[in-house]
Amino acid sequence: MNQEEKKWLLENKYRRLILENIGKTGKTEKEIIEELEIKLMPYLSDYQPTARIKMTPSSLKNHLSLLLREGLVEKKAGKFYQKLEKM
Amino acid sequence: MSKSLLPYEILESARLVGFNTDTMLREDTPKFFLNYNRITAIKKTEGLILVGKETENGMIADFIVTKGKKIEIPVHLCFGVVKEKGIQEIIPRFIIDDGGKVLILAHCSFPRAKDLIHQMEAEVILGKDAVFLYEERHYHGEEGGAKVFPRFQVHVGKGSYFKSVFSLIKGKVGLLSIDLEVYAQSNSKIEILSKVYGRCKEDRVKIKDAVFLEGEHARGLVKLRAAASRGGDVIMKGITEANAPYASGHVDCREIVQGEGSTARAIPIVRVGDETARVTHEASVGRVNQRELDTLMARGLTEEEAVDMIVKGML
Amino acid sequence: MLRVIDLTIIPEGNSQPIVDGVSFEVRPGKIHALMGPNGSGKSSIAYSIMGISQYRPTKGKIIFCREDITHLNITERARRGITLAWQEPARFEGISVYDYIKAGLQGKNGDTVKKSLELVGLIPEEYLNRKVDNSLSGGERKRIEIAATIAMKPKLLILDEPDSGLDIIVYSEFYEILEAIRNETKASILLITHREEAGEIADEGTLICQGKVKAQGSFKEIMEKYCILAGRKVKCQKVSCPTKS
């Protein structure tokens, strides 16, 4: 599958975040879940929001499965690594 | 509160699109008004934080509902420009903290736009069990010279409800390109409705509404409604992607085309990445349904009146 | 009120007529049943009378109140007092019941909307703000459709199988509604139906089979002919008809 056909994979921000997170060093699923968190801090206000969003394990599993299949990620010894391929 | 908070044309356009300007201007109504790059009104209420900073071409702002607070009165936003030419850039952040609730009514008005660019880069987060209802009504004047680019990225926490309604159905459009992305967590509910009427050959509308269902039992509905007449062009892309167990979604595009040179394209995209998820879609593009037309004409309406009634109902 | 003379319809792309030399008359203030089995051409005749373009007559004339309306369009016919309630009413996104019914009033009093809903057995306050879409049941949409036609105070009301899809328990109520409509509006009614129970209400009728007239006259005369055609050994009564034995 060529680059053009894979562009849709990166339409989803969660998949982009996963790829950024695992990078070249590699991470387990558990590590990815723990580290990936979405929060939004105010630009100007001092208010500290408690709102935090974490990826669910089932959703992560599905994303990794897709990224593996499409060759953007590889798995070695239980860790996931980003495959070096420019999109 | 003084009517000089907003120029006359912007208030008139707010009335035209159905907002109650008396309510908007009332002293106790929570509000945030921006006239090009001047913040002309900020009115907070308990649980609602509104902070803005003027920039050369617009502003940066925070709209925050604090934890557990339910704002019962609608909050009015207004971002307008009465100049004919120029650029307005708005960078807002909407934070609806855990358990918060708010309805925001936003009016974006460019009544004299001849060569005017409006860009908005908005980020939104809803915590757990929060409710954010957002309705944005636009008016771009009668010259067709506005170029409007709203971009939203929305993250919706567990058990939360996000509903967004965008409408641009009065006046000309000019160029409109909307890009909305929503990420929905477990047991959350998303509803997106976009309604646009491209009335002339200067009107070019491009809408991309994407819902990513990332949590179990998350639900999403993307509804796109458009009419293109007298040479207008509308393209609507509605994406729903389900990546979690029992997530469900639906994309519903309906576009009506009238008059020579008018074009409409609907691109519903549905993707499923979990064996228990389900997403459906429906799309209808083209002339008004003949049966609907015949029914109204059998009541004594002319074809033009019947089309008008059907398009108004749809939008 | 209405005279259909030698009506023949050959739709585009067809070589055979779907309606072939049909003539009948609907007298003022009467209910005329157009009867026949499914596919006999009854609805096609109704649509042609209403002026629906796909059912334009290939031959023949339609005379309404002594005016030849054969070449008038739907709107022109509607404004002369003809209207049609569809067998399967269309759904209209975003249009309220009130606006849908009011659309046909053409300047008449808005109170007519409520009255027409009452005539079809619906409580106005419960329906005026609802949308004419899938949120209404099939029976509700049918009633609203009929209400919309009544509100126009037409001279000729064409009802295309208004009783189709109704439960048997609702029939008697339906025919009561029809009687109330006739009394209230004084309109002539052309009732398209394949149900024998229509005899309860029709003054006279025309039996259509394979696009042609097979019988005309009183309802009893029609039913006798209908049963013969259907191969029934026992002649039909007005209320019920035994099945073929």
Image: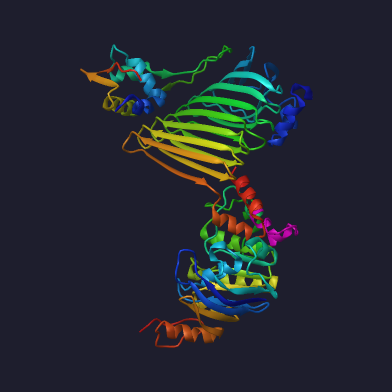
Queried whether the magenta region covers residue C112, the answer comes back as: yes
Query: What residue appears at the point 69 percent right and 17 percent down from the top-left corner?
Result: B39
Query: What residue appears at the point 41 percent right and 18 percent down from the top-left corner?
Result: A37
Q: Is residue B95 something that shows in the picture?
A: yes
Image position of C92 (left or right of B81): left
Position above or below: C202 against B67: below
Position above or below: C190 against B77: below
Q: The N terminus of chain B appears in which quarter of the rendering?
A: top right
Query: What residue appears at the point 49 percent right and 26 percent down from the top-left corner?
Result: B154
Across and down, in percent, residue C62 comes to 62, 73
Q: Of residues B240 and B102, which is closer to you in this image?
A: B240
> What scheme was used to colour the molecule?
rainbow
Across and down, in percent, residue C134 comes to 52, 52
Queried whether the magenta region covers residue C124, the answer comes back as: no
Image position of C165 (left or right of B229): left
- Residue B292 placement: quadrant: bottom right
Q: The C terminus of chain B appears in which quarter of the rendering?
A: top right
Magenta span of residues: C99-115
- Residue C172 placement: quadrant: bottom right
Q: Is residue B247 something that shows in the picture?
A: no
In this rendering, the count of numbered labels is: 0
Across and down, in percent, residue A80 comes to 27, 18
Position above or below: B48 against C158: above
Query: What residue appears at the point 60 percent right and 66 percent down from the top-left corner?
Result: C50
Across and down, in percent, residue B100 comes to 55, 26
